[in-house]
Image (cartoon, helix red, strand yellow):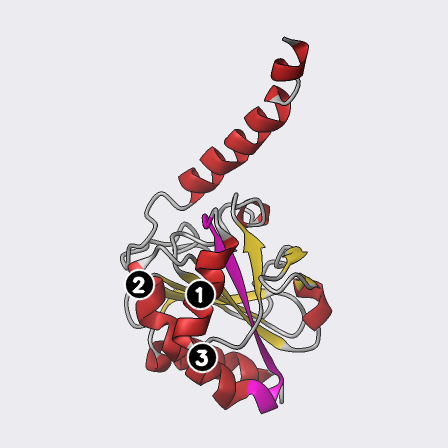
Amino acid sequence: MSAMTRPRPRVAAAAAATVAAAALALTGCSSSGSSSGEGQVGFVTVKGTNLSKAQPGERGDAPDITGDTLEGTPAKLSDYRGKVVVLNVWGSWCGPCRAEAKSLQTVSEKYKDQGVQFLGINTRDTEKQNAVRFEQEQGVTYPSIFDPAGTQLLKFAKGSLNPQSIPTTLIVDRDGKLAARAVGGTTEEALESILQPVVAEQKK
């Protein structure tokens, strides 16, 4: 009897993390995201409500996302300090994630020689193989941290440029600050509209 009840605390903790992650991404696979940061000083809506940016000097610190990649290699966001990081939150089960994947890959290749690193956060995929197959089918070559319970997403402070739904794409500047966000599926044009200014400002 005791052997059967012993794992329950761990199961409860995992369930709580999963519920919290689901609540965070309640509007998952929705392209209509409203920003909790919009209306605050430094936040500007760009080309509609799904794209937002924070002006230099008004940016909050990005949390240090950590974990093993889908290939099993340890990775963390702070490893890329000094580069502009495009952080994409996605799941293999998400239609808009599939629709935007090739655009993300294209932009990653275009900017890889300009000090830009793409990093994914794969969430709510209970089977890693599903996420690996997704990347293979979509031709994605940049790394993604495997975060099935969404624990890394909970590191983002409320009221910041935090993930609002799945997919969400965040731009982290070279100082590790949250500079811009695209809520919902994005395109090459939309992504570059918030990425290019961050890349350019670092060259001044």
Where's residue 78, x and y in %? 70, 65
In this rendering, position of residue 61 left or right of residue 35: right
Instruction: Pick the quarter of the image with the C terminus.
Output: bottom right
Residue of label 3: 105
- Residue pictured at 57% horizontal, 86% vertical: 112
**Disc 3 to disc 1, how far (Cα)?**
15 Å
Q: Give the residue at mark 1.
A: 133
What is the distance, in whole Å, between disc 1 and disc 2 at their CAs?
Answer: 16 Å
> x and y percent of residue 90 in the render?
43, 59
Mark closer to the chain start, 3 or 1: 3
Sooner in the amino-acid sequence: mark 3 or mark 2: 2
Secondary structure under tag 1 reads helix
Contact (CB < 8 A) between labels 1 and 2?
A: no
- Residue 61 is situated, as x and y percent measured from the top left of the image, at 63, 58
Q: Is residue 74 left or right of residue 22?
A: right
> Helix, strand or loop at disc 3?
helix
Magenta span includes 113: yes
Does residue 200 appear in this view? no
Residue at 62% from the left image edge and 85% from the top image edge: 115
Q: Which residue is mark 2?
A: 96
Residue 46 lies within the magenta run: no
Indicate the quadrant where residue 75 lies: bottom right
Magenta residues, start to end: 112-125
Q: Amino acid at mark 2?
A: Pro
Label 3 and label 2: CA atoms lie apart by 15 Å
Q: Does 159 sit above or below residue 132? A: above
Which element type, helix, strand or loop, lies under badge 2?
Answer: helix
- Callout 2 crowding tier (Cα within 10 Å): few <14, some 14–19, many ≥20: many
Which quadrant does the N terminus fall into? top right
Which-is-in-front pick, marks 3 and 1?
1
